[in-house]
Image (spheres, grey):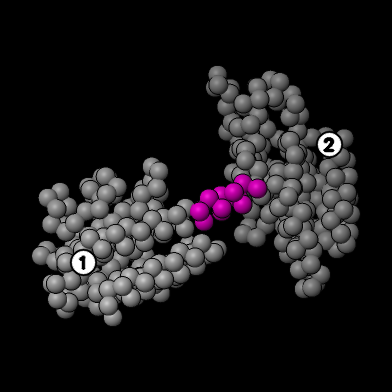
Amino acid sequence: MNKDTDERDLLRLLSGMTRLMQGCPEESDILNVAWWYLPVMFRNYDGQLHLPDSPTGIQSTSLQWGPGTVFPLLPDPDFCPAQRKGTIVMAGDQDCPGCIRTGDWGCCVPMPFHDQSMGMLRLVQNAGKEKSLIKNKDRILGLVSVVAESLTLAIDNLRRNHLLEKASLRDPLTGLFNRRYLDDCISQTMSRAKRFEQEFGLILFDVDFFKQFNDQWGHVAGDEALKAIGKFLLKNLREGDVPCRIGGEEFLVVLHDCNYEDALIKADELRRGICQFALKSASGQRMGLTISAGVATYPVHGDNFKKLYSRADRELYKVKKINRNQIPKCNE
């Protein structure tokens, strides 16, 4: 194969890889695309692609190809010049910690983006290849740099899209789902319950005397109280249950595969847990917080969301009229 044909093939491969990565819905799909393309594009080299594996920035191998190379794990970013400086480091460079076999031609190519590291590409010439291949090092370095940039952009775009999607479905203050998500969730929950003849429950609750709480302690304290409720719900519900903030100090929890009695028990667990919050004001005073709740279950109290919500709302109003810090009685 002559040089011009080889160049055309590389450009075709790079274009195809970039196009496929842009359409990937998950990072694992981007890795799958890279798995198909990188060993072909760098067929005379052993290589590894690393992606961040923890919030600390320490990285682990995500993808490896080639017959003979086992790379050591990347060092801490503070001790890796490629990661620290965001520039290509060649094997044998004076400040390189020695990730590449001594005496081999190779390079570490970082994938920096703004102030974070997306990962790292590392190449080492195959042990069985002639050293004349090193003459193409400038061409290889140019190609691997473009590949690293394409991977960086694909991963960053995917993460940004996920963040935007998450932001559109969650309440920014509490981290709970919002009304938009609830509308989709309840439709799916209703369909599944009908299909499998299952029950599910709703717990509707709000914070007692929340206006007075804000007046006494301030709106910052009120926001902190709502955040605490959000964290509590996320920690104390089953996987599959759906906690939502539907407005102000009002919350709704969807309990999958749950009858009325069990929904009442869960509502009381939430009430008692929130009563025990150790919230303190700026001056160190304890800020008491209580909730009142209404409960409804499908299909006992209705065959659609409007009926279920109305039932739960009536129960909530009833217990608040009698007293606060309450849930309905089982026989009501």
- In the foreground, 279 or 84: 84
- Say which element carries label 1: helix
Amino acid under disc 2:
Lys
Q: Which mark is residue 320?
A: 2
Spot occupied by residue 199 in the image (x, y as percentages of width and height): 79, 65
Disc 1 vs disc 2: Cβ atoms closer than 8 Å?
A: no
Q: Residue at x 31, y 72 (%)?
A: 4
Query: What segment is highlighted magenta in the picture?
Result: 157-168
Amino acid under disc 1:
Asn
- Say which element carries label 2: helix
- Quarter of the N terminus within the rendering: bottom left
The answer to whether residue 161 is magenta is yes
Spot occupied by residue 113 in the image (x, y as percentages of width and height): 40, 47
Q: Is residue 51 left or right of residue 210?
A: left
Residue that carries the numbered disc 1 in the rendered image: 136
Q: Residues within 10 Å of mark 1 (few under 14, many from 20)?
A: few
Q: Nearer the viewer, mark 1 or mark 2?
A: 1
- Res 74 seen here: no
Q: Residues within 10 Å of mark 2 (few under 14, many from 20)?
A: many
Q: Residue at x 35, y 53 (%)?
A: 111
Spot occupied by residue 103 in the image (x, y as percentages of width and height): 10, 65
Q: Is residue 206 left or right of residue 129?
A: right
Above or below 301: residue 274: above
Q: Residue at x 67, y 57 (%)?
A: 241
Report the residue that reaches farthest toward the left: 103
Q: Is residue 140 left or right of residue 236?
A: left
Spot occupied by residue 55 in the image (x, y as percentages of width and height): 40, 49
The answer to whether residue 20 is magenta is no
Main SS category, magenta section: helix
Q: Quadrant of residue 69?
A: bottom left
Q: Residue at x 83, y 61 (%)?
A: 298
Q: CA distance from mark 1 to mark 2?
A: 78 Å
